Amino acid sequence: MKLHKLLKDYFWMIIFAVFLSGSSVFAFEPGTKIYGNFYLFFVEMISFLPLMFILVGLFDVWVPKEKIERHVGPESGIIGTFWVVVLATFQAGPLYGAFPVAYILSKKGASIRNIFIYLGAFSCIKIPMLAFEIGFVGLNFSILRSIISLPVFIIIGIIMEKIVGKDYKVNKV
Amino acid sequence: MQILIVTSAVCLLLSFAADKKKTLDGTMRGIKMFVNMLPALLTVLAMVSIFLYLVPDDTILKYLGRHSGPLGIAIAAIIGSVALIPGFIALPLAGIFLQKGIDYTVLAVFITTLMMVGFFTLPLEIKYFGKKAAVIRNILSFTGAVVIGILVGIFI
């Protein structure tokens, strides 16, 4: 039964792998180019995500729920929002890396509003990415974009809380 | 990147020194979550790889440079939402296009939608947040990103 589930989970990946192997055997150019793209994304993912998950796991066993609930929970107000924004700005990587962190924050009692504000801050104002943006696009642009983004994703967090309700929980995947 | 490796190593060591069993438990939980996420994540990366072959990123950015005004904004917003170009590729390209005279508003809309909206990662997001929350978050983020882009264009 386990094998059956594995086959089902990886169905598309198996087809993809067969396609890539075939392409490399027959020197089929689109296939080799797609492999090049995939390799790039895969390296980006594998170089940070496993570590991020281990940190999430350690966070799970060490950090007591009361602490998170008190600091970023439903009663934490503006200070709680401040903390999730700070947490998000110190991270790096694509947005999908923020999903497991959102899950663990939700499990530990962070408010829904703060979880979606965290996602907004993660996508808009990560410091490592800001450094890149300042270097390539310019300081004025980056600062202006960050300052304008802040209220926008806070509003999005408030709207999300209204829509999904206060009892909403992020799933464990 | 190095920061993450150092942080993880320090956390693991401290945790291990404090409580071996707990550390093992936490690490296993993390690895298990990662393994569970892997099939969906790899499928997303495969889809984006195929998409990027069909529509290469320099083609994407060429389209951005062609139009300004509402049409330019609309094109930038749609491309930014579907593209999953990592920041370390997208931002240098954005810098090049800025020098070539691309409209600031168009560029800002592209960057903000690229960061905030994830069309291809939606299946993954749905697994964590459920269909309703994931779809609404993306719609709100899309709207928010366009607003941010336009405001940046006005004030710069």
Image (cartoon, coloured by chain):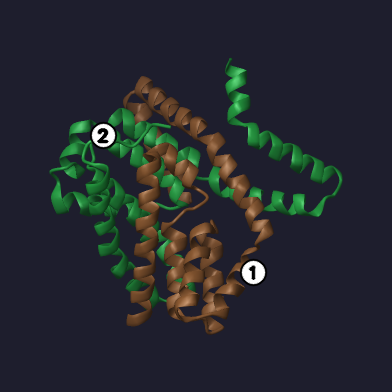
A144 or A132: nearer the viewer: A144
- Can residue A3 be seen in this snapshot? yes
Q: Say which residue appears at 47% left-offset and 52% top-offset.
A: A94
Parent chain of label 1:
B
Picture coordinates of residue B126, whole percent (x, y): 43, 41
Picture coordinates of residue B86, whole percent (x, y): 53, 58
Mark 2 packing: few (<14 Cα in 10 Å), some, or many (20+)? many
- Which mark is drawn over residue B59? 1
Q: Residue furthest right?
A: A26
Helix, strand or loop at label 1? It is helix
B64 or A86: nearer the viewer: B64
Mark 1 packing: few (<14 Cα in 10 Å), some, or many (20+)? few
| Chain identifier, colour green | A
Q: Say which residue appears at 59% left-offset and 73% top-offset.
A: B63
Total numbered badges shown on the rendered structure? 2
Parent chain of label 2:
A
Residue labelled with disc 2? A108
Helix, strand or loop at label 2? It is loop
B56 or B73: nearer the viewer: B73
Q: Say which residue appears at 12% left-offset and 43% top-offset.
A: A75
**Chain B on-screen colour:** brown
